Structure formats: structure tokens, C-alpha cells
Image (tube, rainbow, N blue to C red):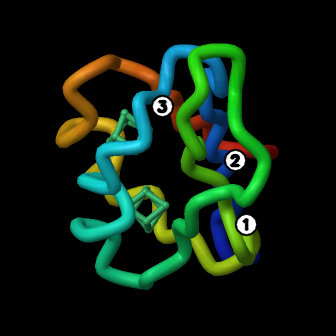
Amino acid sequence: MPKKQFKVVFDRDRCKGCELCKTFCPKKLIEMDTQVNARGYCPATMTDQTQCIGCQSCAMVCPDGAIAIYEEE
Ligand code: SF4
Ligand code: SF4
């Protein structure tokens, strides 16, 4: 069976750069962008999407509901 692939999507302008998602990702796949968003924060981004295990930790911990995770076919 092929390995499941997940897509993590950040709502870039909703993110306040608190880094909670980065801290809680067990695979350490989240980094902060160097470009600021519309609110002036450096938002979270994915490093290697293909390594995501879909655990949802990042989405659950985000206080602003800025992360959605989709399972890809
Ligand atoms: S779903 Fe899990 S593995 Fe994937 S980015 Fe979020 S915390 Fe990391
Ligand atoms: S937890 Fe949410 S608000 Fe905080 S850095 Fe991550 S995406 Fe942004």
C-alpha cells in the first residue's frame, strides 16, 4: 500500500507567528517564513511536505485556527 500523503495548508494572513505549531510538530517540519504577512508577522510554513504524518498536532495547537490538513489521494 502506498504511503499516505498529507497536505498542510496555512492561512498565511491569519497566522500570528507564535511558533506553537513549529514547537509541537513531532517531525520538525514547520519553520517560520522570513517574509512578513499582511499583519506584520513572520508566518509558519512547511519545510518538507512529503514527510508529514498527518498527526494534526499543529492544527490542534494553533490558537488561531490557521492550519488545515488534507489527505491526498
Ligand atoms: S500534521 Fe503533524 S507531522 Fe504534519 S506538519 Fe502538522 S504536526 Fe507536523
Ligand atoms: S500555531 Fe498558528 S498562529 Fe502560531 S505560528 Fe503556527 S500557524 Fe501561526
Give the residue drawn at x 65%, y 27%: 12
| C-beta proximity under 8 Å, tags 1 and 2 | yes
Q: State which image quarter holds ligand 1.
A: bottom left
Classify mark 1 as within 8 Å of ligand 1 or not, answering yes or no: no
Type of the residue with mark 3: Ile
Q: CA distance from mark 3 to mark 1?
A: 13 Å
The picture quadrant where one finds residue 50 is bottom right
Disc 2: which residue: 7
Which secondary structure, mark 1? helix
Disc 1: which residue: 49
- Res 67 label: 3
- Res 15 label: none
Classify mark 3 as within 8 Å of ligand 2 or not, answering yes or no: yes
Classify mark 2 as within 8 Å of ligand 1 or not, answering yes or no: no
Mark nearer the N terminus (1 vs 2)? 2
User: Considering only vertical position in the picture, is 20 above or below 52?
Assistant: above
Q: CA distance from mark 1 to mark 2?
A: 7 Å
Q: Position of residue 51 (x, y in %)?
A: 64, 80
